[in-house]
Image (tube, rainbow, N blue to C red):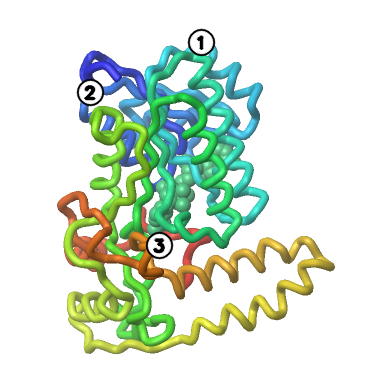
């Protein structure tokens, strides 16, 4: 890539999402020209994007990214130097995951290659290291295509976002117990703030050392278990520490019922996948996986950024959860 500040133009897909919105603001702040791709009828209406503080500094291109011809047509007359993709299935259902995490990225990559763009930065996820879910396989399939495409790329695999750890703020504030799976010490993550991750993704456009690499990344400080999250949140909320354990077997029971039924009723397949997603997050850490030792390695999981979970919890306790909702991904 040329210098970051010679008006490099970046196509940003997934610009209306949790991370995408912060990437849009970071790009504008750092002097990039941004073309935010929004889908027709999506979360942000074209007619209103200028009123949206995250997107007001961007140009907008409205295109259904899951349609290869439509994307090619929409971007044919747009000059751009790089792509950052923060696209993600909003619900993780298998069909949607393949359409968004794989097909839409493949369509954008084709348009980027055709348009002569010189770098593609992909927001992926650390959990693809141990793939068991449809969305993980879809992400991995695109990662492979991106690596094989000849396009300069950076694949960023973050650990948990702050929003993924914010689902119980209101219940703890109301004096209820913090819920954990198992005893709350069997998994851990190194959560990262959306603004810090956005900075890292924009660094990936500029930094030659990040070129053509797969980069797992977490936030600052030590890894934290769900039990430690509960203790921290209760303390900051001024509540006695109350942790209630839930067996992750609830997901096995749900799957025992849903899996055979979904063979007869395909409409239940998505529900079975949601139970698999729940079981995955209840039992797997969001840390670097060490193949040799067959275990997650907190110390080897890289850190980036400034914002801590403690500061984040204090802020949402004060200001409310607005903007940190998990939507279909909420477990508790
Ligand atoms: N949550 C975590 O802790 C975590 C941790 C590590 C990695 N990740 C990964 O980070 C990525 C981004 O997460 P996020 O929370 O920023 O996602 P998000 O808020 O759900 O945003 C998803 C984006 O993709 C767009 N999109 C979804 N379906 C689409 C479709 N059919 N056509 C066009 N656009 C579509 C959305 O557009 P609309 O606004 O129009 O719906 C939105 O801009 C995901 O890949 C996730 O797996 C998440």
Q: Position of residue 29 (x, y in %)?
A: 22, 30
Q: Residue at x 56, y 24 (%)?
A: 110
Nearest the camera: 46 or 306?
306
**Mark 3 closeness class: few <14, some 14–19, many ≥20 residues within 10 Å:** few
- N-terminal of the pair, mark 2 or mark 1, is 2
The residue at which mark 3 appears reads as: 291
The residue at which mark 2 appears reads as: 31
Q: Seen from this angle, which residue lies furthest right?
A: 264
Mark 2 vs mark 1, CA separation in Å: 22 Å
**Mark 1 closeness class: few <14, some 14–19, many ≥20 residues within 10 Å:** few
Nearest the camera: 113 or 268?
113
Q: Residue at x 30, y 66 (%)?
A: 297
Q: Residue at x 76, y 68 (%)?
A: 262
As drawn, 260 above or below 153: below
- N-terminal of the pair, mark 1 or mark 3, is 1
Q: Position of residue 225 (x, y in %)?
A: 30, 75
The residue at which mark 1 appears reads as: 77
């Amino acid at each position: 890539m040329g210098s970051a500040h010679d008006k490099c133009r970046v196509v940003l897909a997934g610009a209306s999402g949790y991370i995408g919105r912060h990437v849009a603001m970071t790009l504008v702040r750092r002097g990039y020209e941004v073309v935010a791709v929004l889908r027709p009828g999506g979360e942000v209406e074209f007619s209103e994007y200028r009123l949206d503080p995250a997107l007001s500094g961007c140009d907008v291109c409205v295109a259904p990214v899951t349609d290869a011809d439509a994307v090619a047509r929409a971007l044919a007359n747009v000059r751009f130097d790089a792509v950052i993709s923060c696209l993600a299935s909003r619900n993780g259902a298998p069909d949607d995951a393949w359409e968004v995490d794989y097909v839409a990225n493949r369509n954008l990559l084709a348009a980027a290659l055709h348009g002569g763009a010189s770098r593609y930065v992909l927001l992926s996820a650390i959990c693809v290291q141990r793939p068991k879910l449809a969305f993980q396989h879809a992400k991995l399939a695109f990662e492979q295509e991106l690596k094989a495409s000849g396009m300069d790329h950076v694949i960023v695999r973050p650990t948990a976002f702050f929003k993924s750890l914010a689902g119980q703020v209101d219940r703890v504030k109301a004096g209820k117990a913090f819920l954990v799976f198992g005893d709350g010490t069997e998994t851990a993550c190194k959560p990262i703030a959306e603004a810090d991750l956005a900075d890292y993704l924009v660094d990936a456009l500029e930094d030659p050392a990040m070129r053509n690499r797969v980069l797992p990344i977490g936030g600052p400080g030590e890894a934290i278990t769900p039990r430690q999250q509960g203790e921290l949140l209760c303390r900051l909320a001024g509540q006695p520490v109350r942790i209630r354990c839930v067996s992750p077997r609830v997901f096995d029971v749900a799957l025992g019922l849903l899996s055979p039924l979904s063979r007869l009723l395909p409409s239940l397949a998505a529900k079975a996948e949601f139970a698999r997603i729940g079981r995955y997050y209840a039992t797997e850490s969001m840390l670097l996986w060490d193949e040799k030792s067959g275990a997650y390695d907190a110390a080897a999981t890289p850190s980036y950024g400034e914002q801590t979970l403690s500061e984040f919890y204090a802020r949402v306790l004060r200001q409310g959860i607005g903007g940190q909702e998990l939507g279909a991904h909420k477990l508790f």
